Amino acid sequence: MDVNFPDEFLWGAATASYQIEGGYNEEGRSFSTWDVYSRVPGNVYHGDNGDVAADHFHKWKEDVAMMKELGLPAYRFSFSWPRIIPAGKGNVNQKGLDFYDRLVDELLNANIKPFPTVYHWDHPAILDNTGGWTNRDMAYYFADYAVLLTEHFSDRITNWITINEPFVVALMGHHLGVFPPGLKDVKAASAAIHHLLLGHGLAVKGMRTNAKQPLQIGITLNLSSVESATNSPEDQHAAALRDAYLNRVFLDPLYYQKYPAEITGELGFVFPEGFEQDFSVIGEPTDFLGINNYMRDVVKFNPADAPFTFEIVYPKESSYSTMWEMYPQGLYDLLTRLKKDYPLNAIYITENGTAVTDGIDADGRVRDSRRIQYLQDYMASMNRALMEGVPVKGYFVWSLMDNFEWSQGYSRRFGLIFVDYENEQRRVLKDSAFWYKNVIRNNGFNFKTYYTEPF
């Protein structure tokens, strides 16, 4: 079966600054919140951190050359706030801008569209001294940072993402306590949710006002289809609460200027006083929605952590990667649900991929057939939704290269490119990279059930 995409469909790969750059103390960069968090014993697997990561700060030219070899039409990366405005506000670090000038110009010379994210979780650590995202001022600092980037780069870059996965910053960082700043406080999480959304809206308005040409601007949310483990009323209600907590808490204010009733009611989130007055800014029109999707959520009722009575379960009959369930139907279900429930004109899959255990074989090859299986299955599911009218405009594999996988450190590999951390971060194209090269060249693929041969 052939899986084909529209001629204008945009293919790409994605990374994030802290996960690949390294150069943590070079050319004026300040400590980020992740530099601080990763140095606390027990926060990151094996005590790993992003000080060197994939060393993209020094190997960027080699990396762009590999993107060109793959025929990559677009590259999603993120700017490092600590590298550009080390204090979070005020003075600009010219050397930080110079690094990204070199990267952007090299991408354009290779005919690769830059598709940057303004904020992928690594703000200057000094801002946490005054509350970080729990402080309303943070929204304005972020907007100023976004405007600065627009003024400097919008002559060359037209596609922009404001914030990557506010759920992770707000809920995982301030409610679950497993990401920076490591809080377990519903009130802090409420403030962080609201200020991230406010910062997004302020940024969109400021970026349009200060751009040197018309821009395409969106936000990226990590979204999943949510299913109840059984048809019992308790499990179905638990799934509805999980959907509000994961998906609708950001979708509803962005598109309908309100928070879900479950969030402010049963789940007990209390937003800053006068929050309703910010909805007109939060709902500033955007051009697309970015979606990061890896798996579905299967939920059962569990009263142990009331009022958060939803528990994620893992069906025994499913297949799994080293991190998550592999369930491509979930992407189709998510996309068709979004088309039904929200007024979306364009969607980009800004992250999708899987971590598998791979390594360099004796012949120098990296055989990651399980990743290829995952990618083709999810792409086929995306294509099915597209053929049914969901406005999917592009797809970015996560990730271009192996990287620092946050709290998992270097124990998980998501890349199309193998990074040999024990050998000066040398790069090796995996089988999945050659497969993806053919997908891009053919604007589609022939659907198979497994792969064992090179491409």
Image (spheres, helix red, strand yellow):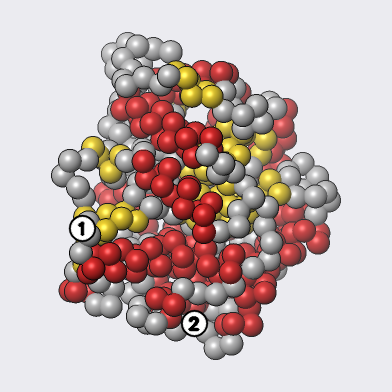
Q: Earlier in the sequence, mark 1 or mark 2?
A: 1
Q: Nearer the viewer, residue 339 or 122?
A: 339
Q: CA distance from mark 1 to mark 2?
A: 33 Å
Q: Which element type, helix, strand or loop, lies under badge 2? A: loop
Give coordinates of residue 233: x percent, y percent: 23, 68
> Please, which residue is most extreme toward the right here?
212
Question: Where the N terminus falls, by quadrant?
Answer: top left
Check disc 1: other Cα within 10 Å, few if <14, some if 14-19, many if 20+. Answer: few
Q: Nearer the viewer, mark 1 or mark 2?
A: 1
Q: Please state which of residues 217 and 366 is positioned toward the viewer in this rendering.
A: 217
Horizontal side of 76 relative to 94 (left or right) equals left
Q: Residue at x 83, y 48 (%)?
A: 213
Residue drawn where x is 22% and y is 74% of the image = 305
Q: Which residue is mark 2?
A: 271
> Relative to 73, is 172 above or below?
below
* Whole-percent x, y for residue 300 in the image: 22, 62
Report the quarter where the C terminus lies: top left
Q: Is residue 37 left or right of residue 135?
A: left
